[in-house]
Amino acid sequence: MKKILLPVDGSDNSQRAVEAAIGQAKGSSEPVEIHLLNVQAPIISGDVKMFIAEDQIKAYYHDEGIKALAKARAALDAAGIAYAFHIGVGPIAETIAAYAKEKGCGQVVMGARGLGSLTGLLLGSVTTKVAHLVDVPVTLVK
């Protein structure tokens, strides 16, 4: 079975990646397992945690993740493609790479922001970091 990790942030770029993954799944000769992932960057430092309950922080990450996943889930549902969805919290590229390894994904399909390679390298873009951190093919969709 082919496993694809599909990180999305709710942007138009990530939605195009969803459409590309749907095309791959429909055109595949083997079953495809899609793992839809949204990663929330940590917003609370240790000093602030003492003033906000842990369950409130978790609820915030969950709610924001669900919002970011909504369009992707709707597209996968409409296409009749089965998937599992996940919401991670942490450094974005590192969390994507960890999920790819944990879920045994053989490919990552993600949206690109359209930055040139030099600009992406200088800015340390998420896509560049993911490509360096994973040991599987990364398909970038513009």
Image (cartoon, rainbow, N blue to C red):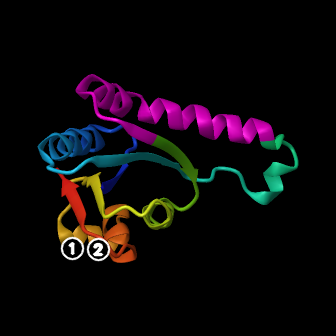
Choose between 62 and 11: the one closer to the eye.
62
Q: Which residue is mark 2?
A: 121
Residue 113 x/y as whole percent = 25, 53
Q: Quadrant of residue 53?
A: top right
Residue 96 x/y as whole percent = 45, 60
Choose between 20 and 63: the one closer to the eye.
20
The reply to whether the C-beta atoms of the residues labelled 1 and 2 are less than 8 Å apart is: yes
Residue 106 position (above or below residue 34) = below
Residue 77 position (above or below residue 125) = above
For mark 1, does the 10 Å Cα neighbourhood hold few (<14), some (14 to 19), or many (20 or more) residues? few
Question: Is residue 123 in sight in this rendering?
Answer: no
Residue 72 is inside the magenta segment: yes
Magenta span: 55-84
Q: Is residue 138 left or right of residue 66?
A: left
Instruction: Provide the secondary structure element on which disc 1 rests.
Output: helix
Residue 123 is inside the magenta segment: no
Instruction: Provide the secondary structure element on which disc 2 rests.
Output: helix
Q: Residue 118's mark?
A: 1
For mark 2, does the 10 Å Cα neighbourhood hold few (<14), some (14 to 19), or many (20 or more) residues? some
Q: What residue is at 37 percent from the left and 45 percent from the top?
A: 8
Q: What residue is at 78 percent from the left and 38 percent from the top?
A: 55
Residue 78 position (above or below residue 25) = above
Residue 127 position (above or below residue 74) = below
Residue 22 x/y as whole percent = 21, 39
* Alpha carbon distance from label 1 to label 2: 5 Å
Residue 111 x/y as whole percent = 26, 50
Q: What residue is at 44 percent from the left and 47 percent from the top?
A: 37
Give the amino acid type for the residue marked by disc 1 in the picture.
Leu
Q: Is residue 70 left or right of residue 52?
A: left
